[in-house]
């Protein structure tokens, strides 16, 4: 089987799909490798991510990894969400085929982009906290 049961589950029944109208931060990123797009919405209360939703024009692996990523950061402090790597998301899904690893980067980057937007709205420079939202080594 090419895809793990968890990947198939999150692909056919993705969690936290949609948008948050009064979001505290919105991030949109594109995948340099395939051109797919991911949009992430977050609500933040007292430094904790209380809600998160995503929308994607992406492949099944992008849907599954974003679904898992939103589950992993919901209810968590911002600091923890910033530490979430695409590798950890892939591990939580019991792996992805190597050719689909680049898809998992969209979720990580979209979370960072949404948090970056959140800090900017607060009048805080996000760069020292989040750093550059770059591509991963799988994408080139
Ligand atoms: Fe583009 Fe998967 S092929 S995100």
Image (spheres, rainbow, N blue to C red):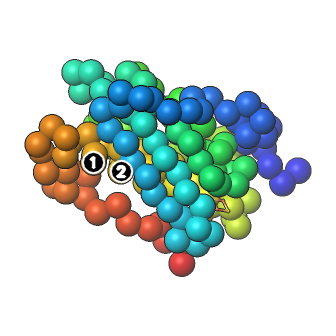
Q: Classify mark 1: helix, strand or loop.
A: helix
The CA span between labels 2 and 1 is 5 Å
The C terminus sits in image quarter? bottom right
Q: Residue furthest front?
A: 21
Which residue position is annotated with label 1?
A: 116
Viewer-closest of 86 and 60: 60
Q: In this view, does 91 lie to the left or right of 20?
A: right
Residue at image location 47% in from the left, 66% down from the top: 136
In x, y percent, where is residue 124? Answer: 12, 44
Tell me residue 127's x, y (percent). 19, 56
At a point 56% along the width and 32% down the height, the residue shown is 18
Residue that badge 2 annotates: 113
User: On the picture, is 30 further left or further right than 134?
Assistant: right
Dots 2, 1 in contact, CB < 8 A: yes
* Residue 23 spot, x, y in % from top left: 36, 31
For this rendering, which residue is in front, 18 or 6? 18
């Amino acid at each position: 089987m090419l895809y793990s049961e968890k990947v198939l589950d999150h692909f056919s029944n993705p969690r936290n799909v949609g948008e948050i109208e009064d979001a505290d931060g919105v991030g949109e990123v594109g995948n340099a490798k395939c051109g797919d797009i991911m949009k992430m919405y977050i609500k933040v209360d007292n430094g904790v991510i209380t809600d998160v939703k995503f929308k994607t024009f992406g492949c099944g692996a992008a849907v599954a990894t974003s679904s898992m990523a939103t589950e992993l950061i919901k209810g968590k402090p911002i600091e923890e969400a910033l530490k979430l790597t695409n590798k950890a998301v892939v591990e939580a899904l019991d792996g992805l085929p190597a050719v689909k690893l680049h898809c998992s980067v969209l979720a990580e980057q979209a979370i960072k982009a949404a948090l970056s937007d959140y800090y900017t709205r607060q009048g805080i420079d996000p760069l020292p906290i989040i750093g550059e939202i770059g591509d991963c080594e799988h994408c080139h």
